[in-house]
Amino acid sequence: MDINQKRFIEDALDLLNELDEGLLQLEANPHASAPLEQVFRTMHTIKGGANMFGFENIGSLAHQLETLYDYVRQGKMQVSDGLISITLHAFDKVRDLLKEKDATRINNSDALKEHLQVAMEFLKAAEATGDLADLSGTTVSKDELATFFLRVSPSVALTEDGNHPLIFILQDIAILGNCRVLVHKHPSGEVALWEVIIATTTSQAELESYFMFVENECAVEYIRLAPGDLFEDAAFTEYLDALQGQPVALEQLQPILDRRQTTYTAPLEEEGEGDAAAGRKRVASDSFIKVSKRKVDDLLNWISELIILQAQLSNTALSLQHPALTNVTEQLEMITGRLRDTSLEIGLVPVETLVTKFKRLVRDLSRQLGKKVNFLSEGAETEMDKDVIELMADPMIHIIRNAIDHGIETPEVRKAAGKSEHGAVKLKAFNSSAYVNIVISDDGKGICKENVLKKAQEKGLVAADANLTDDEIYDLIFHPGLSTASQISDVSGRGVGMDVVKQKIVELRGSVSVKSQPGHGTVIHIKLPLSRSIIEGLLVNVAETRYVVPMNVVERIDRIPYAELCRDNKVNKTVVVNEEPLFVLSLREQFHAGLPPPRTTDIISVQVNGARKGIAVDKIEGKMQTVMKPLGDVYKHQDFISGSTILGNGNLALVLDPARLFSMSVNTITV
Amino acid sequence: MSKHYESHAYLTFSLGEEKFAISVENVQEVVELEQVTKVPNAPDYMLGIINLRGRVLPLLDTRMKLGLQRTEITKKSRIMILDLTTEEDKSLQVGALVDIAKEVIELTADDIQEAPDFENYKTHAPITGVVNNRGDITMIMDIARIFSTADIVQLNTLN
C-alpha cells in the first residue's frame, strides 16, 4: 500500500466516525438540514478519496448511498429508519474493510456487493412506491453561483503530466463549472503554482474537501472573487488573456471586481458586501494536525531531560549566588514548567471520541432487544490520555451493554412500574485532582443484592453466614465467574466480562465501584489516573532496592516483627495481620534472599483479583506521586515490574504490578 | 574520492586483554558507571537499569553476553550507550558495560581484513573483520547482532 493510500485510510476512518455521528443526529432530527448536509458532504469526500486512491468498490457504494441522500436533500425522499440503518451497516462494512492491511483485499469487489445491492433495491423500492414520482417536477434549490480564485502551490516536485493525485484533483475541479487553469513552472519544468479561476455553484467548503487528502503536499489559498460568473465580464477575460504567463495580480483586478460587486444582483445574496475582500486573506489552514505518537513521545522524553537539567542548574545557581544567573535560572524554571504542562496535554484527547461509538451501540442494541433507550453524555470534553481511552473503550462498551441488557427493562415493564417507556443510559466524565472520573449510570431495574449474594454463596465465593456490607455485595459482580442473568443471552451474561472490566481498570491503576438501588438503576463509577505515566504509590525499601506499590490497590499497612513472617517450618503459611490470616509475599525472600533480615517488616495489604493479600517489605518510606517510565522490551519478561521512576537523588525505584506479582509467585510455588 | 580511501570511524574498547572496535554510528555516548538498580528475576548478564539524565536504560554486561566471565567493576569501567534497531524497526537504547573504552579511530576498507574463523566466538561474537597493526589485533564487532532484542528475549525465556 502506498503512502497516499495509507493516509486516505487514516482520514477515511475519521470521516466514518463523523458520518456515524451525522447519521445518528439525522435520525434524531430527520428534517434538520445541517446533519443532512454533513452526511452528504462526508460521503462525497469518502467517495472522492476512495476513487482516487483505487478503492473503487468503496467509491461506488458511497456513490449509490450518496444518490439516496441527494434525493433527501432535494426533498424527494424522507429520512427513514431503513435508510439510516442500511447506511450505517454499509459503512460499518467499509470500516472493517479499511482495517485490512492489504490494498487488494480492501478493493475486493465482492466485499461490498451485498450492501451495494441493498442500496440499489432501496432506491428501486422507493421509486416503486411513488416516493420519487415528481423527480423532475420541483426545482432544485442550488447553491449560489460564484467565481472563486484558487492558488495551489505544490510543496512537492511534480510535473504537469505526472500522475500525482493533485493533477487529478485539479481535473476534477475543472469540470465543476466554467474554469480556467493557469500553470506557472520553475525553470526546471516542475510546477510552481497553479492559478485556478472557476465559476461554480460548488461551495468553498466543498472545494476545500477536494484537497483534503493532499493537504501535506500543497498549500491552497481560496479567494471568492465575486458573485456570479466572472467569465461573463469581458474586461475580466481580456485581463486573463493579457497575462501572458504572469501571475494574476489581484490589485489590478480590483476595479473589475468592485464594479461586478455593485452591478451583480444575485437572487439570494447571503454574504455581505465586504466578503470578497475579507475572503482574500483566507488561507487554507487547519486547526488540527496529525503527529505520530513516536514524535510526541520523543518530545516528552526531551522535556523530562530538560527538567532534570534545569533542576541541576537551579542547584548550581543557588550555590553560586550570582544575581544575573539566579535571574535567568528562575525564568528558565518558569518556562520549563509551562513547557511540561503543555506537553503533557498534547497526548490527551477528549472522551467525546468514544461517544459516537457508544451512541451506535445503544441504538443497535436497544433495537435488537426491543427496548427504548436514550443515551446522554455529559462532560464529553473531558480529556484523557489517548492510550487510556483506547484501552478503556472495550470495558466501557461492556458496561453499557450490561446496562441495556440487564438494567433497562422492556417498555411494557417500565410502563407498569410507572416509569417512562424510554430508559436512559448516561455517561458523565469529569476531572478531580490527578484523576479522570467516568460515571456510567442507567435508570433500569438495578442490581438485586439478594440474587448476587445467593449466587455467590451457591458458588462458594462467600461463606453462607458471611455478613457483607452493600458495597461488598455489589463488588461481587466483578468476581470472575459470577453472572446474575438468569438466562444467558447473546449480548452479555456469559459470566466473563465484569471481572475483565475490573482487571483492565486496575491495570491502568484505576478503581471502580458500583452503587445500585433496586427499581431505580445502577451507577458504575470508574476512576482513572489522568495519565498512564503519572503514578501515586507507596515508596518502600527492600534490601536497599526501592520499590513503588501503586496506591490504588493498597488497603492497609501494618508493622510486625520479621520473625512472624518466617513460616519456613510451619504448615500454616499465612501471617496473622489485624487478627485475620493473610497470604503474604515477602519481596525480600522472593528477590533478595540470603541477606541478613531487618528486625521488623511492614506488611502492605492489597486487593488483588478480588482477594486480599499481603506484600512484605523492609520499610515503607512514604507516599509519592511521580512519573513512571517503562522499562522497555528488554525487560518484558519481568512483567511484575510495570516500570521505573526516578527519585529525587537520581536513583531509580521499580514500580510493582501487584496482580502480576502474585500470579508469578503462584507459578513459582507450584513449580 | 576513491572508494579505497573512504574511512569510517570506530570506537575501540577492551574486554580483558582483547581489543574490539564498533562503528560509531551505533554509539550515542560513553558514560561512567554510577548507580545501577537490579531488576529481579532477570538473567545475570542483564545488570539492571540506569538513569541517563532522566532516561531509564537497561544495562547489559558485554562480557557475559559473549560467554566470558562477569565484568569486574573498576574505575575504568565504562558504559557505551548504544542506539540499536530492533527487528520490528523500533529504536532501542541500551547501555553496554565494558572494561575500558579507548578511542575513536578512522579505518579504511583496506585496513580491515576478513575475520578468521574463531571457534569459540563463531556463535557468540559476530566478528566481521580484524585489524592487524603489527601483531596488535583489534576485532571489528557487529554490535547490533550481539544486543539484538530477539536474542535478549530468547535468553530471557531460557532463563
Image: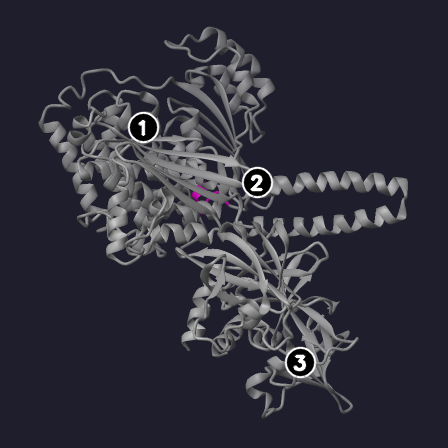
Q: Position of residue A373 (x, y in %)?
A: 25, 32
Chain bearing mark 3: B
Position of A573 relative to A36 (above/below) = below
Query: Does A506 appear in magenta?
Result: no
The part of the chain drawn in magenta is A159-166
Mark 2 — residue?
A345
Q: Which mark is residue A445?
A: none
Question: Can residue A164 be seen from the camera position used here?
Answer: no
Chain bearing mark 1: A
Query: Does A163 appear in magenta?
Result: yes
Mark 3 — residue?
B140
Position of A124 relative to B152 (above/below) = above
Q: Do tags 2 and 1 sit on the same chain?
A: yes
- 10 Å neighbourhood of mark 1: few (<14), some, or many (≥20)? some
Instruction: Nearest to the eye among marks 3 and 2: give it.
Output: 2
Mark 1 — residue?
A25
Distance of mark 3 from mark 1, alpha carbons?
A: 66 Å
Q: Nearer the viewer, residue B126 or A146?
A: B126
Disc 3 on helix, strand or loop? strand
Distance of mark 3 from mark 2, alpha carbons?
A: 46 Å
Q: Earlier in the sequence, mark 2 or mark 1?
A: 1
